[in-house]
Image (cartoon, coloured by chain):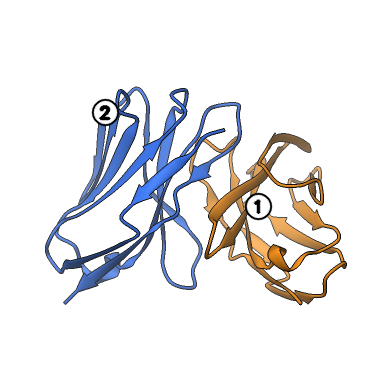
Amino acid sequence: GENVEQHPSTLSVQEGDSAVIKCTYSDSASNYFPWYKQELGKRPQLIIDIRSNVGEKKDQRIAVTLNKTAKHFSLHITETQPEDSAVYFCAASVRGADGLTFGKGTHLIIQP
Amino acid sequence: KAGVTQTPRYLIKTRGQQVTLSCSPISGHRSVSWYQQTPGQGLQFLFEYFSETQRNKGNFPGRFSGRQFSNSRSEMNVSTLELGDSALYLCASSLSGTQETQYFGPGTRLLVL
């Protein structure tokens, strides 16, 4: 089955700086890659997703890039703000297969 | 629209018992997925139901089962509980499958003693 590795497990950045979280996946048939944000004590919420026919997608301060050859995808957050502090999960899935496979999560800490 | 709801929110059971958790999806959503969240293993996919049929299944033992009703509400059952089943169980709904926005419920926190 699919295996997703996520790095780093903890990331601390100064407010206003950029943050980058990286994930690699094992199944070359994976074609859908969402990112979820989970604040402490709350439910995960989708923040952005990308499909395998697209190399990059942006939504305001958030962007995701996908490199199918290397089987990795990354989340980029620019101009970080205190409300960006949360755990971020990447995931991958193969249509018709085993649902979403999640990475272990990255705890993003925004330092004031 | 009302969000995804789960009942109960907290549950304490002892080893060997069984438990049933319930999930009510967003109105109009036909796909319901279940996930187990633990500090050590993170978020793990259990299964997905669509139109009352299990469409996908993760790598969990047969003690974990589920079903979906005609109104898309779903239940999951864990039989012969083990200490390692202690976790937050999240359900998520979407219009038609796991490759679109999943809307998560608040979860049921299960503690097995």
Q: Position of residue A33 (x, y in %)?
A: 41, 37
Front position in the image: B95 or A45: A45
Q: Are marks 1 and 2 on the same chain?
A: no
Residue visible at 16% across and 77% down in the picture: A112
Query: Disc 2 residue type?
Result: Gly
Q: Residues within 10 Å of mark 1 (few under 14, many from 20)?
A: many
Which chain is depicted orange? B
| Residue at x 77%, y 64% (from the top left corner) | B82
**Image coords of residue A19 (percent x, y):** 20, 56
Left/right of residue B103 with respect to residue B55 in the rendered view: left
Q: Is residue A90 above or below residue A1?
A: below
Quickly name the residue at label 2. A55
Question: Residue at horizontal 57%, vertical 33%?
Answer: A1
- Which disc number belongs to residue B80? none
Can residue A36 be seen from the camera position used here?
yes
| Protein chain holding label 2 | A
Image quadrant holding the C terminus of chain B, namely: bottom right
